């Protein structure tokens, strides 16, 4: 089977191209799938999380996937962040230190993920000079995204992450993808609410909405992320099933993708030049908590 | 035997990164065991640099499913928390109270949210 891939940017069109690619495989088993990337003139590195999840799904269906005719600039990006190491290429050094490597994790890898973020991002001297308040918020946000995938996806095939820093634009992109049941199905299974894919994502980002049952409460992770991104001036995109949800500058937009993503992707872009202190104006006393 | 127990989150988790629900469960197990005995517990977050709602839900939010608000307020104290972490814990606690106290209200809020989002997007 010969497929081709267009350019992949960190936006709705990029996700659309990836789900179209998966749809063209028609759920095949034991196929040889050659993906011609000669038309992939650009590939935003953090989108490797979603792309890697799709390729992993194809591999789980016992297909042999080969990436062919990758333009040199894209091959360079995907080699530096370690993505192409999964597909028979050598990893090359990241001379400018702007990549957060592509990795796959299992749901029990919370601590390994935490170590990855600390090593590959927080303690790297090449990374942007962010205020301590922003760095703390950013770090917490990434962990909230990962925890969300661990707690809700029910994936057995893993969680994929990747990031990229753009020093001249003062922007940092980071994505986490899972191959789980997706938000819509999770809500339906646990709450009994039947929603469209876009409605389901919107529901999950509202405070106090949670699919959690049993002894441990939930319902804050995506809301905290949404609040942080609103303050920071970046944006957040969530893709789950066929739903696409984006929030930027306090405004939410949604769309329906032409085909489903086989899980959920949470993708953020943060403004690294943000100088807000993130210190709360009203002091809360330790005696007021319970 | 002391009536007061001091619990170091860093010691239980073994790391300044308190992000995993499984680590929160370990904290919960200790706190629940002490509260069942009616002991006062001081929970120290000294040297903890990163907290998530997933961790705090498991460690502390979960207590509201087993113990009354009065018991928790009387027996549990936290210390050495940064202001923003304290604010996160407060939200986790408020959400947990709602989660356990009134499932019907929780369901109503869910439905209202959906209707609100329909007109928002």
Image: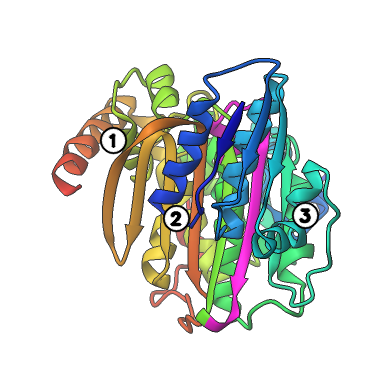
Can residue A274 be seen by looking at this rendering?
yes
In three-dimensional space, the C-alpha distance between marks 2 and 1, rounded to whole angstroms, equals 19 Å
Structure colour scheme: rainbow
> Where is mark 1, residue-wise?
A199
Residues marked 2 and 1 touching at CB (< 8 Å): no
Badge 3 marks a residue whose secondary structure is loop
Mark 3 or 2 closer to N-term?
A: 3
Q: Is residue A154 magenta?
A: yes
Q: CA distance from mark 3 to mark 2?
A: 30 Å
Q: What residue range appears in magenta?
A: A149-168
Which residue does the numbered mark 3 point to in the structure image?
A: A82
Q: Which of the chains bears the disc numbered 3?
A: A
Instruction: Determine the residue positioned at 51% across, 43% down.
Output: A265
Q: Residue at x 20, y 47 (%)?
A: B121
> Do circles 2 and 1 both sit on a common chain?
yes
Left or right, residue A7 beside residue A189: right
Chain to which the residue tagged by mark 1 belongs: A
Name the spot of residue A38 as percent of width and height, x first.
60, 51
* Residue at the disc numbered 2: A224
Residue mark closest to the camera, 2 vs 1:
1
Displayed quadrant of residue A232: bottom left
**x, y (%) of residue A109?**
75, 40
Q: Residue at x 66, y 65 (%)?
A: A73
**Mark 1 crowd level (few <14, some 14–19, many ≥20, 10 Å Cα):** many
Mark 1 and mark 3 residues within 8 Å of each other at the beta carbon? no
**Image height of A32 relative to A137, above or below:** above
Q: Nearer the viewer, mark 1 or mark 3?
A: 3
Dot 2: element: helix
């Amino acid at each position: 089977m010969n497929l081709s891939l267009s350019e992949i940017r960190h936006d709705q069109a990029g996700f659309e191209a990836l789900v179209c690619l998966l749809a063209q495989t028609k759920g095949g088993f034991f196929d040889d799938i050659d993906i011609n990337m000669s038309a992939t003139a650009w590939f935003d590195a953090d989108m490797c999380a979603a792309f890697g999840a799709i390729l992993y799904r194809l591999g789980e269906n016992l297909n042999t996937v080969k990436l062919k005719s990758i333009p040199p600039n894209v091959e360079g990006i995907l080699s530096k962040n370690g993505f192409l190491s999964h597909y028979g290429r050598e990893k090359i050094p990241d001379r400018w230190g702007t990549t957060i490597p592509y990795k796959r994790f299992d749901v029990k890898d919370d601590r390994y993920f935490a170590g990855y973020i600390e090593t590959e991002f927080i303690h790297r001297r090449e990374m942007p000079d962010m205020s301590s308040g922003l760095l703390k918020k950013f770090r917490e946000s990434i962990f909230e995204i990962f925890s969300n995938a661990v707690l809700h996806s029910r994936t057995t095939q893993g969680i994929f992450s990747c990031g990229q820093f753009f020093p001249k634009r003062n922007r940092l992109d980071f994505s986490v993808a899972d191959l789980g049941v997706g938000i819509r199905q999770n809500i339906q299974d646990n709450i009994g609410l039947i929603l469209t894919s876009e409605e389901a994502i919107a529901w999950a980002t509202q405070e106090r909405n949670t699919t959690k049952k049993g002894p441990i409460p939930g319902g804050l992770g995506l809301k905290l992320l949404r609040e942080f991104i609103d303050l920071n001036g970046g944006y957040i995109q969530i893709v789950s099933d066929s739903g696409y949800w984006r929030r930027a500058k306090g405004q939410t937009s949604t769309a329906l993708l032409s085909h489903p993503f086989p899980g959920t992707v949470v993708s953020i872009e943060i403004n690294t030049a943000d100088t807000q202190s993130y210190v709360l104006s009203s002091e809360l006393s330790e005696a007021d908590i319970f | 035997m002391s009536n007061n127990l001091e619990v170091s989150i860093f010691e239980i988790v073994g790391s300044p990164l308190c992000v995993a629900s499984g680590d929160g469960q370990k904290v919960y197990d200790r706190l629940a065991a002490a509260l069942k005995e009616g002991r006062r517990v001081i929970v120290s977050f000294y040297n903890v640099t990163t907290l998530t709602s997933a961790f705090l839900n498991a460690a502390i939010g979960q207590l509201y499913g087993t113990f009354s608000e009065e018991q928790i307020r009387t027996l549990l104290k936290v210390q050495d928390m940064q202001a923003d972490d304290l604010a996160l814990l407060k939200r986790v606690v408020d959400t947990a109270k709602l989660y356990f106290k009134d499932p019907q209200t929780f369901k109503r809020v869910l439905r209202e949210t959906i209707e609100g989002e329909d007109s928002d997007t």
